[in-house]
């Protein structure tokens, strides 16, 4: 579900950044990716990565579209090293034709609560929440960005 922008700070360096998605053009257009995996996480939610092989996972604007979120989150927990971080961000806007019916039925607070429960069911530790709201005078940025983080415990 990776796109052309990883939303990573340009001044931060990483040993590797793996993008997983179905759009080859979007993956190829992302300059931060060191590896690209063509896979539809809704059709095949198993990650083609080794156990405990990753430090962190970033899901940017993916949550509204996950049809098997607990399975995906369990897979992320499996590939994260103990203490590894999952970061989930989402905005107030989403594509209704692609978003799950449950996501569309909930408000922002209920979406956070649902994601917290799903992360805990997948084996993650306590969930932290936050958001960034644009200044009223901002001409380009209009929607709040909500973020959730959790860590994989030492033992799953």
Image (tube, rainbow, N blue to C red):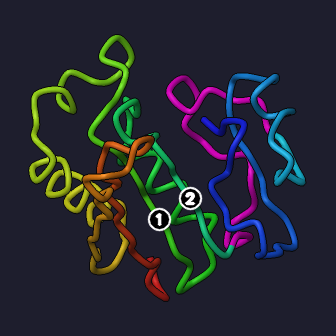
| Marks 1 and 2 close (CB-CB < 8 Å) | yes
| Percent of width and height locating residue 67 | 37, 29
Q: Residue furthest top?
A: 97
Total label count? 2
Please report the residue visible at 41 percent of the width from the left and 54 percent of the height from the top.
89
| Percent of width and height locating residue 59 | 51, 51
Magenta span includes 130: no
Residue 22 lies left or right of residue 130; in this view the side is: right
Label 2 Cα neighbours within 10 Å, binned few <14 / some 14-19 / many ≥20 = some
Numbered tag placed on residue 87 in the rendering = 1
Please report the residue visible at 65 percent of the width from the left and 39 percent of the height from the top.
2
Which residues fall within the magenta stretch?
Answer: 37-54
Identify the secondary structure beneath mark 2: strand
User: Considering only vertical position in the picture, is 15 above or below 61?
Assistant: below
Q: Image quarter for residue 38? A: top right
| Percent of width and height locating residue 14 | 82, 73
Quadrant where the C terminus is found in the figure: bottom left
Please report the residue visible at 44 percent of the width from the left and 84 percent of the height from the top.
153
* Among numbered discs 1 and 2, the one appearing first in the sequence: 2
What is the spatial separation of the Cα atoms under label 1 and label 2, in whole angstroms? Answer: 5 Å
Q: Mark 2 sits on what residue?
A: 58
Identify the secondary structure beneath mark 1: strand
User: Would you say the magenta stretch is mainly helix, strand or loop?
Assistant: loop
User: Considering only vertical position in the picture, is 128 above or below 71?
Assistant: below
Foreground residue, 131 or 2? 131
């Amino acid at each position: 579900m990776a796109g052309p922008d990883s939303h990573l700070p340009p001044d931060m360096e990483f040993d590797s950044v793996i993008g997983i998605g179905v759009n080859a053009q979007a993956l190829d257009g992302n300059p931060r990716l060191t590896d690209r995996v063509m896979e539809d996480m809704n059709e095949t939610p198993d990650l083609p990565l080794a156990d405990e092989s990753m430090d962190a996972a970033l899901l940017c604007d993916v949550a509204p579209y996950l049809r098997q979120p607990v399975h995906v989150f369990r897979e992320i927990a499996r590939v994260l090293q103990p203490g590894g971080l999952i970061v989930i961000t989402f905005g107030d806007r989403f594509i209704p034709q692609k978003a799950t019916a449950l996501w569309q039925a909930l408000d922002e607070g209920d979406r956070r609560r649902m994601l917290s429960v799903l992360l805990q069911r997948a084996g993650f530790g306590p969930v932290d929440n936050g958001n960034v709201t644009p200044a009223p005078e901002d001409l380009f940025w209009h929607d709040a960005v909500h973020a959730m983080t959790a860590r994989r415990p030492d033992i799953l």
